[in-house]
Image: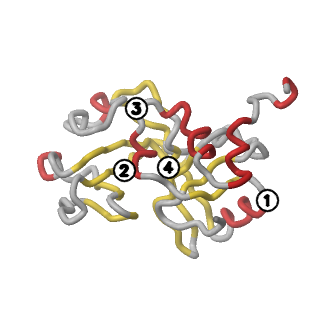
Amino acid sequence: MTDVAPGALLVATPELHDPNFVDTVVLMLDVTPEGALGVVLNRPSPVLVAEVLDGWAGVVAEPEVLFRGGPVSTEGAIAVALLQDPRDEPVGFRHIVGRLGVIDLDTPVELVDGSLAGLRVFAGYAGWGAQQLEGEIAGGDWYVVPSEESDAFRQDPSGLWRDVLRRQPGDLAWHSTRPLDPELN
């Protein structure tokens, strides 16, 4: 899979040395000819959602912390949500794929409470300009793979990179077994 679409995952390859993205898994939220936007799923912060977003703490999935969504606009937040019922989209919800979407955090919590199976809040995002992401993929920086709804809401995201690669068909699954430091192999 090399086509990037909303809902796809970008998995950092061993060749990607940018410290913002080493061993990351990025959920793509928006892909247009003008650029692309996603959030890093496996970088939790120590900051509790309750400390920065009044009212949303009771709705977020565990761990109830902000995740570092990427290096762009880290003072802003994006909320990724999973619907209980895809036929019951609450106010402020924008569909991405399947039951997955984003919630406008200016929406009153009581209007979405009970309609979500999961919610995760990301400080910042990963963004690419026109053709930038395509160049990085062609250069071997990213694997493009399908997502599963649960990827964005894992209680312990530390093993997400390996787990996503492990479930891929063919040779791609073998990359999940690479040592952290190939020199030690």
Q: Which mark is residue 80?
A: 2
First in sequence: mark 3 vs mark 1: 1
- The answer to whether marks 4 and 1 mark residues whose Cβ atoms lie closer than 8 Å is no
Q: Which amino acid does the dot numbered 4 rest on?
A: Val
Does 15 sit above or below residue 170? Answer: above
First in sequence: mark 4 vs mark 3: 4
- The residue at 40%/27% (across/down) is 47
Specify the quadrant of the image occupied by residue 142: bottom right
Q: Secondary structure beneath disc 4? A: strand
Specify the quadrant of the image occupied by residue 129: bottom right
> Residue 60 at x, y = what percent?
29, 38
Give the distance between the C-alpha atoms of the residues marked 4 and 2, in whole angstroms: 9 Å
Give the distance between the C-alpha atoms of the residues marked 3 and 2, in whole angstroms: 15 Å
Q: Which amino acid does the dot numbered 2 rest on?
A: Val
**Residue wearing tag 1:** 139
Q: Secondary structure beneath disc 3? A: loop
Give the distance between the C-alpha atoms of the residues marked 1 and 2, in whole angstroms: 29 Å
**Residue wearing tag 4:** 39
Give the distance between the C-alpha atoms of the residues marked 4 and 3, in whole angstroms: 17 Å
**Residue wearing tag 3:** 155
Q: Which amino acid does the dot numbered 3 rest on?
A: Gln
First in sequence: mark 3 vs mark 2: 2
- The answer to whether marks 4 and 2 mark residues whose Cβ atoms lie closer than 8 Å is yes
Q: Nearer the viewer, residue 45 or 97?
A: 97
Q: Secondary structure beneath disc 2? A: strand
Whether residue 99 sits left or right of residue 112 in the image: it is right
